[in-house]
Image (cartoon, helix red, strand yellow):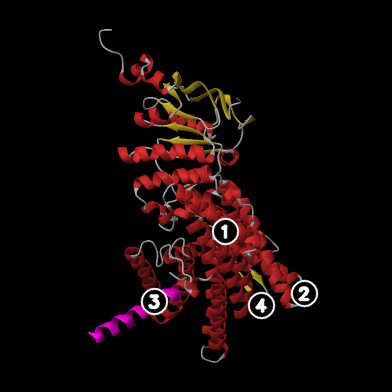
């Protein structure tokens, strides 16, 4: 089966620091891949490279067979890679509904002219976008809060809204940067269900960075472990759990060995 | 719950149109009915173009979240372009004046794009400084060109700006900016204010929307400049200095960044107050500045914050409140 996302030999240098090197991954459609590793291993750097926030020193990224080289970040999003952020980045002073509708931007194509004159194309597309946005909020149980400002949502709901906004761009691959950070165990297990639901409902591949091992081991079909910018192990959750190299990277070497 | 008729879209259009017409009739009644003298009537023209300036600056300040300090520069480009056009051609006023205003707006808009493309790569105070610089450059260029009359100023501009024209332009400006903001384009602009990185990750082109918004903002400043030129009938480069830009910025900040009604109210108030205070002569500017300081201390987000007024729901909630009061009174009597 051809992979939907094909990353080959990706690497980036910040001055003298090789933040990431020889990063290879093939992600199939509907696959959930976990990206773990100690702090500073280069996990978020991978996301920033995939969305062209940084341009790689070497290597290639192909989405459904097409290279993303030279595209700007918003073009990569239009192309089909959406992401969330480690520190939540919502449009705080805008309503929950409008947050999601903002991400429908590229699904609509009416001009400024028809917006000013409220032509039929404006009314039709706005109505459709509104309906889709409300449906999307339903998936995350956020419909009742559609009119509240995003900044006044509770923390867990803000995380969910960010995922909803990313999904609104109609991605093929969704990148989640620590979606469970700051959530309590019951919220985390709810999130696990939601992530699986998303994969089934929207038919997309998901790559997630996470420190919560219950979540990672629970839903990821494949896990990549990064340390100092290199992949040190990859495989199924059970293999990773018992891999001595991974344990060493996280806990250090046992003394006297 | 049944939706109130006042929140129905078509009815709201009707209501808004009605309100605009009523306001127009009121102004015409006040000015030509002999209630206000000529000097007081002319204030409406000043209020009009100041509202256009403030609302257009609010677009790039309050909604796009940038801080440009060269609005007077765009205004001057529009003023000179439209004045030179109307002096060159001789057409009936119904064609000549709108064409002149349009040309003023387009000239300012193009200047906006030329300045915006390099300047909008910068953020915050850097953008403020560079636009301030560009504003001064425009002024100095106009000062040194032959066909703009240089330091003598441009004289002999026909007086076309009547209250009706200014009123019409003001309504169009507010309408266009308001409807634009309530569309996908407006959401893109506001998302850039809220978080540039997230906006980009949502598929919004920062360069495109920053530049276009800047150009629209400049366009309306140019139209206001055109109205100004055909009201004063004389243009002097020294009127478009840094202080004019700051004056417009003060209107925007006082009214509330991101509130159109705020800009309208504060532009009106700040145009009238200096005139009302004329009898205090020497203390005029002191009172004016004190007023600004007091507002900024007690309401730092501006008079209206980000509140946006809309007539239908406002009347609706007023009705509800009144009805609530009556019901409560009735209940008290029954006891």
Task: Give the vertical position of A86 relative to A151 (above or below).
Answer: above
Residue B243 within the segment the image draws in magenta: no
Compare marks 4 and 2 and give the one earlier in the sequence.
Answer: 2
Find numbered disc 2 in the image and state the secondary structure of the residue it sits on.
Answer: loop
Q: Residue most toward the bottom?
A: B34
Q: What stretch is highlighted in magenta?
A: B314-335
Find numbered disc 4 in the image and state the secondary structure of the residue it sits on.
Answer: loop
Which residue is depicted at the point 46% across and 47% down?
A: A139
Compare marks 3 and 4 and give the one earlier in the sequence.
Answer: 4
Find numbered disc 3 in the image and state the secondary structure of the residue it sits on.
Answer: helix
Q: Which chain carries label 1?
A: A
Residue on which disc 2 sits: B90
Q: Position of residue A189 (x, y in %)?
A: 35, 37
Q: Nearer the viewer, mark 3 or mark 4?
A: 3
Residue on which disc 3 sits: B320
Magenta stretch, main secondary structure, is: helix
Task: Give the vertical position of B263 relative to B20 (above or below).
Answer: above
- Badge 3 density bin: few <14, some 14–19, many ≥20, Cα 10 Å: few
In this image, A257 relative to B58: left or right? Answer: left
- Badge 2 density bin: few <14, some 14–19, many ≥20, Cα 10 Å: few
Residue on which disc 4 sits: B160
Q: Give the distance between the C-alpha atoms of the residues marked 1 and 3, in whole angstroms.
A: 28 Å
- Badge 4 density bin: few <14, some 14–19, many ≥20, Cα 10 Å: many
Q: Mark 4 lies on which chain?
A: B
Can you say which quadrant of the picture contains the N terminus of chain B?
bottom left
Viewer-closest of B29 and B143? B29
């Amino acid at each position: 089966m051809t992979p939907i996302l094909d990353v080959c030999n990706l690497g980036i240098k910040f001055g003298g620091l090789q933040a990431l090197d020889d990063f290879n991954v093939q992600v199939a459609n509907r696959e959930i891949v976990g990206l773990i590793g100690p702090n500073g291993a280069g996990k978020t750097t991978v996301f920033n490279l995939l969305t062209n926030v940084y341009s790689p020193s070497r290597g290639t990224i192909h989405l459904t067979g097409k290279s993303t080289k030279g595209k700007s970040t918003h073009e990569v999003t239009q192309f089909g890679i959406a992401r969330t952020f480690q520190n939540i980045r919502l449009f705080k002073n805008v309503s929950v509904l409008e947050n999601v509708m903002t991400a429908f931007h590229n699904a609509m194509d009416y001009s400024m002219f028809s917006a000013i004159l409220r032509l039929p194309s404006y009314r039709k597309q706005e109505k459709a976008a509104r309906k889709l946005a409300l449906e999307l909020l339903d998936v995350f149980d956020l419909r009742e809060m559609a009119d509240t400002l995003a900044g006044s949502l509770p923390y867990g709901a803000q995380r969910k809204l960010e995922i909803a906004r990313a999904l609104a761009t109609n991605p093929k691959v969704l990148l989640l940067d620590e979606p469970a950070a700051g959530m309590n165990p019951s919220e985390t297990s709810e999130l696990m269900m939601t992530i699986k639901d998303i994969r089934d409902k929207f038919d997309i591949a998901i790559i997630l960075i996470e420190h919560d091992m219950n979540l990672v081991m629970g839903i990821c079909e494949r896990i990549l472990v990064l340390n100092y910018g290199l992949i040190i192990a990859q495989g199924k959750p059970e293999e990773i759990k018992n891999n001595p190299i991974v344990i060493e990277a996280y806990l250090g070497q046992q003394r006297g060995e | 719950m049944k939706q109130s008729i006042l929140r129905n879209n078509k009815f709201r259009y009707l209501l808004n149109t009605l309100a605009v017409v009523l306001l127009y009739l009121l102004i015409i009644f006040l000015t030509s009915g002999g209630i206000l003298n000529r000097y007081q009537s002319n204030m409406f023209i000043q209020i009009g173009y100041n509202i256009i300036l403030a609302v257009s600056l609010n677009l790039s300040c309050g909604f796009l979240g940038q801080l440009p300090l060269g609005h007077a520069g765009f205004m001057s480009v529009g003023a000179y372009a439209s004045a030179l056009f109307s002096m060159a051609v001789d057409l009936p006023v119904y064609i000549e004046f709108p064409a002149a205003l349009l040309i003023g707006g387009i000239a300012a808009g193009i200047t906006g794009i030329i300045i915006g493309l390099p300047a909008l790569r910068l953020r915050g105070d850097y953008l403020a400084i560079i636009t301030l610089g560009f504003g001064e450059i425009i002024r100095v260029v106009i000062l040194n060109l032959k066909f703009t009359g240089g330091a003598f100023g441009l004289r002999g501009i026909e007086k076309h700006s009547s209250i009706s024209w200014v009123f019409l332009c003001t309504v169009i400006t507010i309408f266009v900016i308001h409807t634009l903001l309530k569309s996908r384009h407006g959401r893109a602009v506001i998302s850039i204010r809220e978080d540039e990185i997230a906006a980009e990750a949502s598929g919004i082109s920062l360069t495109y929307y920053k530049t276009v918004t800047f150009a629209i903002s400049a366009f309306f400043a140019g139209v206001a400049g055109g109205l100004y030129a055909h009201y004063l009938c004389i243009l002097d480069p020294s009127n478009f200095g840094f202080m004019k830009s700051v004056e417009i910025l003060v209107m925007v900040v006082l009214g509330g960044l991101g509130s159109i009604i705020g800009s309208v109210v504060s532009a009106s108030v700040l145009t009238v107050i200096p005139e009302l205070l004329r009898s205090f002569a020497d203390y005029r500017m002191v009172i004016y500045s004190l007023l600004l300081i007091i507002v900024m201390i007690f309401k730092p987000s501006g008079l209206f914050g980000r509140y946006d007024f809309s007539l239908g729901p406002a009347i609706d909630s007023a009705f509800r409140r009144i009805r609530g009061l009556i019901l409560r009174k009735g209940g008290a009597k029954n006891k």
